[in-house]
Amino acid sequence: MVSKDMLIGDIIQINEKFVDILLEAGMHCLGCPASAGETLEEACAVHGIDVDSLVEKLNNIE
């Protein structure tokens, strides 16, 4: 399960399909070294993304 306090780097390592969802949500900085150390909540705040809705998408991927 993904939570909003998890680091982006850790989320990506759980499931490579998460990269596509994050990119679709507008997080085009996944290759940036700083993004790996940000929590999902922090990254969503920077990009103006609803973190709760993104967490739901990530946790409902097949």
Image: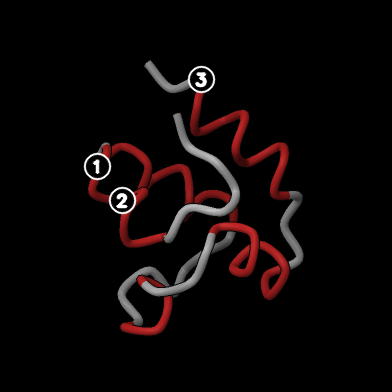
Marks 1/2 in contact by CB < 8 Å: the verdict is yes
Q: Position of residue 59 (x, y in %)?
A: 50, 26
Instruction: Quickly name the residue at label 1.
Output: 16
Q: Is residue 31 left or right of residue 7?
A: left
Q: Is residue 17 left or right of residue 60?
A: left
Q: Nearer the viewer, residue 7 or 48?
A: 7
In the rendered structure, which disc, 3 or 2, sits on the residue that comes first in sequence?
2
Instruction: Quickly name the residue at label 3.
Output: 60
Where residue 14 sits, quadrant-wise, is top left
- 10 Å crowding of disc 3: few (<14), some (14-19), many (20+): few
SS label for mark 1: loop
Q: CA distance from mark 3 to mark 1?
A: 14 Å
Furthest residue toward top = 62
In this view, 51 is above or below 55:
below
SS label for mark 2: helix
Q: Position of residue 27 (x, y in %)?
A: 52, 64
Q: CA distance from mark 1 to mark 2?
A: 6 Å
Where residue 62 sits, quadrant-wise, is top left
Query: Residue at 62% of width from left, 29% of height from top?
Result: 56
Q: CA distance from mark 3 to mark 2?
A: 15 Å
Query: Residue at 48% of width from left, 51% of height from top?
Result: 22
Q: Position of residue 49 (x, y in %)?
A: 72, 57
Query: Residue at 55% of width from left, 41% of height from top?
Result: 3
In the rendered structure, which disc, 3 or 1, sits on the residue that comes first in sequence?
1
Instruction: Quickly name the residue at label 2.
Output: 12
- 10 Å crowding of disc 2: few (<14), some (14-19), many (20+): some
> Which amino acid type is shown beneath numbered disc 3?
Asn
Q: Nearer the viewer, residue 52 or 22?
A: 52
Q: Nearer the viewer, residue 5 or 23?
A: 5
